[in-house]
Image (spheres, rainbow, N blue to C red):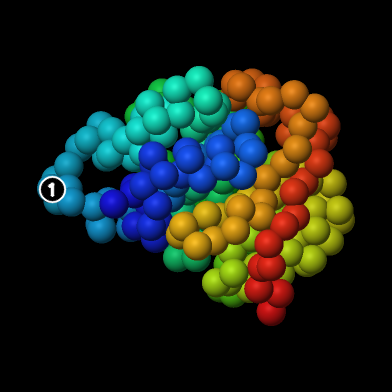
Amino acid sequence: MPVSSCGRIAAEQLVETYLTAGFTTVVLTNHFSRHTFRTAVMAADATWEEKGSFFLSDFEKMKAAAGDRLHILMGMEFRLDYQEETDFLVYGLGEEFLLSNPDILQLKFKDFSVRVREAGGLLIQAHPFRNNVVISDPTFIDGVEVWNCSVGHASRNDVAEFWANRFSLIKTSGSDLHCDWQIIGGGMETDAPITTDGELLATLRGGKYTLLRGGVPNPN
């Protein structure tokens, strides 16, 4: 089973799916929350290092399966312990950040924001206008996901686009791919393949990309 308990596609199959769709790079953003480990086959007293190793396992499997055919970058989709439906995408920070912050899920949002941004990462609120999601103070985020391709949720992408424009936030587009029957309708197009975290951050901060807005997400 994939690291994200809601995922239904093995890491190796994900590689082939994105290659078939013509992608050159994938940023894997598995869920990182208490639910990740509650549903995993792990001992109740698992250490933070063991939890981190479990989270990283899909990333390592994807890299191994991809070889030199597809660039795999590590992202994270955090859900803090005190927020049930609110998710944050973190880009540009990898294993070292994860393993050196064992209290990350217990932080309040503003402290979490400071921790991520001081480490050099980008903090993007995922699908901020779904039902039951807490809309974050734009002062403490770098961007929002303005196109989410899930057909199972009302992401209200048009409202997210308005919000990003209103507060001059970075815009992202996500495929939110969970099952093999879904269409890859999110992503971004760049002049050259993104091969490193540094290139990803520079591209997002510089705005030199075109968002892909395919699929038929639920508008309501």
Q: Is residue 52 left or right of residue 14?
A: left
Image quadrant in which the C terminus is located: bottom right
Name the residue: 57% across, 42% down. 20
Q: Nearer the viewer, residue 44 or 74?
A: 74
In the picture of the structure, the residue carrying the numbered disc 1 is: 43
**Extreme-front residue of the structure:** 20
Q: Secondary structure at mark 1?
A: loop
Type of residue at label 1? Ala
Does residue 215 appear in this view? Answer: yes
* Residue at the image point whose x is 25% and y is 58% from the top: 39
Residue at the location (51% across, 45% down)? 17
For image coordinates 81% across by 41% down, the residue present is 210
Q: Position of residue 106 (x, y in %)?
A: 39, 49
Q: Is residue 160 above or below residue 168?
A: below
What is the number of callouts on the image? Answer: 1
Label 1 crowd bin: few (<14), some (14–19), many (20+), radius 10 Å? few
User: Which quadrant holds residue 122?
Assistant: top right
Q: Position of residue 141 (x, y in %)?
A: 67, 45
